[in-house]
């Protein structure tokens, strides 16, 4: 199975409030600009346009353009030095740490990047691939130290893909899937916090990216083996994804409220805390 890190651009759309999903406008096609602006007092959340497949890095970058992002305030505390012996929990945590790498890249904080990479190394070693991925992670830390941020962005994306590939080569398909889901879930947690602090109603759908993204994550969850899928550890995750799909996919509910956004962030924060090594 190919890596599921990338989200096709055709799926990246924003909730359209009381109306159906809006289509790409001629102005957007000509100008190539993204917009989620409301118009004439009517709630309209327009699609976000991209020219390539989406990654969590693209999602954070787009969210930063539409919010007043204080990236460093969103860093999470360091994880315990000894990862969990539960391989599924470690795999999901590893994905969340990769999501954290994209956040740190936005902040441009070399020391924080090195700290986070140390936690990534600890998880990789627990999953039996430390020696294979360590040279790449060390090179990434060096790039951050040398302020090579432009090149580092793609390197983090490629490193994420390699981790998932190695896991699949080790016959750890479930762990590869959880790494991909973990990276997206951490990104959703980050962006939902940004949106909580953003007053504009037309920015609120950003907190879940799009119902299509939620559906894709739920589909990825469904590809896990039955024992993993039914494990007590992951029940909060699938419950959250299903609940968010129902909440944000209801086009009859009108413009999303601040309480919807706050509730979404709190649910994401709680589940991420439960499923990672905190």
Image (cartoon, grey):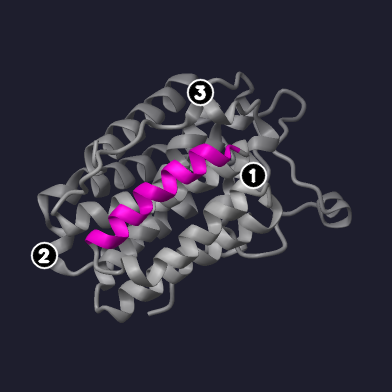
Residue 227, numbered circle: 2
Residue occupied by mark 1: 61
Q: Mark 1 and mark 2: span between their CA atoms?
A: 36 Å
Tell me which label, 3 or 1, sits earlier in the chain: 1
Instruction: Say which of 234 and 41 sits in front.
Output: 234
253 left or right, relative to 39: left
Residue 182 visible in image: no
Which circle's residue, 1 or 2, is located before the other in the chain?
Answer: 1
Where residue 8 sits: x, y (%)? 57, 65
Q: Look at the image and tell me in which quarter the C terminus lies.
A: top left
Circle 2 — which element? helix
The local secondary structure at tag 3 comes to helix
Which residue in the structure is indicated by mark 3?
A: 196
Tag nearer the camera, 3 or 1: 1
Give the residues in magenta.
Answer: 109-126
Q: CA distance from mark 3 to mark 1?
A: 17 Å
């Amino acid at each position: 199975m190919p890596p599921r890190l990338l989200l096709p651009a055709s799926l990246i759309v924003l909730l359209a409030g009381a109306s159906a999903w809006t289509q790409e406008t001629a102005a957007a096609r000509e100008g190539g600009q993204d917009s989620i602006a409301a118009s004439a007092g009517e709630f309209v959340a327009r699609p976000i346009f991209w020219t390539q497949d989406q990654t969590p890095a693209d999602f954070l970058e787009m969210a930063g353009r539409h919010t007043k992002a204080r990236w460093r305030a969103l860093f999470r505390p360091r994880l315990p030095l000894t990862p969990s012996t539960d391989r599924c929990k470690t795999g999901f945590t590893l994905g969340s740490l990769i999501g954290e790498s994209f956040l740190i890249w936005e902040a441009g904080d070399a020391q924080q990047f090195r700290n986070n990479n140390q936690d990534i190394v600890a998880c990789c070693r627990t999953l039996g691939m430390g020696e294979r991925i360590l040279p790449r992670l060390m090179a990434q830390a060096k790039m951050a130290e040398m302020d090579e941020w432009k090149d580092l962005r793609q390197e983090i994306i490629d490193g994420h893909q390699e981790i998932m590939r190695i896991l699949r080569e080790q016959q750890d398909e479930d762990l590869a899937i959880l790494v991909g889901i973990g990276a997206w879930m951490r990104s959703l947690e980050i962006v939902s916090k940004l949106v909580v602090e953003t007053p504009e109603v037309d920015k609120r759908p950003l907190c879940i990216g799009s119902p299509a993204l939620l559906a894709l994550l739920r589909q990825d969850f469904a590809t896990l083996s039955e024992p993993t899928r039914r494990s007590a550890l992951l029940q909060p995750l699938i419950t959250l994804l299903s609940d968010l799909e129902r909440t944000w996919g209801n086009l009859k509910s009108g413009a999303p409220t601040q309480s919807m956004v706050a509730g979404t962030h709190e649910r994401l924060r709680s589940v991420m805390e439960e499923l990672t090594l905190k």
